[in-house]
Image (cartoon, grey):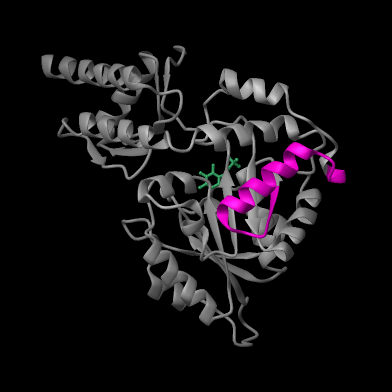
Amino acid sequence: MTKIRYDFRSDTVTRPSEGMRRAMAEAEVGDDVFGDDPTVSRLEAVVAERLGKAAAVYVPSGTQSNLAALMSHCGRGEAFIAGQDAHCYRYEAGGAAVLGSLQPQPIAHAADGTLPIAQVAAAITGGGDAHLAPTRLIALENTCGGQVLPVAYMNEVAALARRHGLGLHLDGARAFNAAVKLGIDIAELAASFDTVSICLSKGLGAPVGSVLTGSAELIARARRLRKMLGGGMRQAGILAAAGLYALDHNIDRLAEDHARARRLAEGLARYPSLAVRMPDTNIVFVDSDADIGEPLGQHLAANGIGITGRYGQHRWVTHLDIDDAAVDAALEVVARFFDARQGH
Ligand SMILES: *Cc1c(COP(=O)(O)O)cnc(C)c1O
C-alpha cells in the first residue's frame, strides 16, 4: 500500500495541532464520573451556552451521543423516525435496536437531504392501536451527507413534532459546518430541537469526543445512559481541553474547508465522465461508471491520495489538514489519470 500523503477520506483524520496538544497537556483534571473534572464541566457549560440549551454531557463518540439521546427520548418498544441514510439509523451498527430495543422508522431522503414532511407525518404512529410501536421522536441530521438543511425546513419538522407531542433530536455531528454555511449562530440552528449532538472530532479537529445538549431532564437521563453504555470517563479533561480549544480556534475556519471542497468539485467536474455533486460544505460526492471509478480510485491510491468509496462512487472530504496545495496535488493526479486514458 502506498502511504497516504493527502488524506481526503474524512474530516476525522485530522491530528491535534501544537496548540491543541499544549492545551491538553495543561488541562486541569479530576474524576469526571464523580463530576470532579473542571475541564469537562467547562466544556459542557460552554457547549450548552453556545447552543442555547440548559445542559450538556460530554461523551466519547457521536455514536454514543446519538444512542444516549434516542434512549433518553424513547423507551423500549417505542419508535423513532430518521432518514434512510441517517447516521443514527444506518451507520451505528443497529445500536438503537440492539441496545435500546427501539424500532427505527426510516424515511427516504429527498435529493436535497431533507425528509419530505408529508412522508414523516404519514410515518407517525400512535393513538393506542395495539399493532403499532408508538412514535416518540423524530431525528434529523444537519449537515446530512454534507448538505445543509435550511432553518425553515427544520422549523416545519419541529412544528409537526409539537403537534404530535414528539421529541425532536438533531444529529449535528457537523452542525457547525451548517451554521457557518448558513451564516447563522449555532444557537439559531439548534433552537427548534430538544436535543442536539455535536462532534468535536470531525471538522473541529479534536482527537476524541462529542457533546449532547438539551434540557436538564433529558441530559440527566443521558448522563445515566452514558454510564450504562460504558462512556463514563475519568480524567477526561485531557480530552475535553482539546474540545474547548477546537471551539475557540476551529469554527470560523470551516469556511475555508467549504471553499476548498468547492474548488476541488469544480476541478473534478471538468471531466465529463465524473458526475460531481456541488458541495454545500466540506463533502464532495462523485459518481461515475465503475469502469472509470475503479481505475481512478486505484490511481489515486497509488499516488498517495486517500478517498473513500468503491466502484463508481467516491467521497472526498476537506478538513484542517487539507490545504490549497493538497487540493492542487489531488487535481494534478486526477489530470494525469485522464491524460493517460486519452493517450490510448
Ligand atoms: C461521524 C458521525 C457520527 C458518529 O460519530 P463517531 O464519533 O464517529 O461515533 C454521527 N453522525 C454523523 C452525521 C456523523 O457524521
Residue 149 x, y percent position in the rendering: 39, 57
At x 32%, y 34%, the residue is 261
Q: Is residue 89 above or below residue 156?
A: above
Q: Quadrant of residue 213?
A: bottom right
Relative to 177, 65 lies left or right: right
Residue 227 x, y percent position in the rendering: 80, 49
Q: Is residue 284 magenta?
A: no
Q: Is residue 212 above or below residue 313?
A: below
At x 44%, y 12%, the residue is 2
Please state which of residues 163 and 187 is positioned toward the viewer in this rendering. 187
Q: Is residue 204 above or below residue 6?
A: below
At x 47%, y 57%, the residue is 189
Q: Quick check: which quadrant has ligand 1?
A: top right
Q: Residue furthest left?
A: 343
Viewport quadrant of the C terminus: top left
At x 52%, y 27%, the residue is 13
Total numbered badges shown on the rendered structure: 0
Q: Is residue 283 above or below residue 142?
A: above
Residue 65 x, y percent position in the rendering: 65, 50
Part of the protein shown in magenta = 33-57
Q: Residue furthest bottom?
A: 128
Please state which of residues 318 and 289 is positioned toward the viewer in this rendering. 318
Q: Is residue 36 magenta?
A: yes
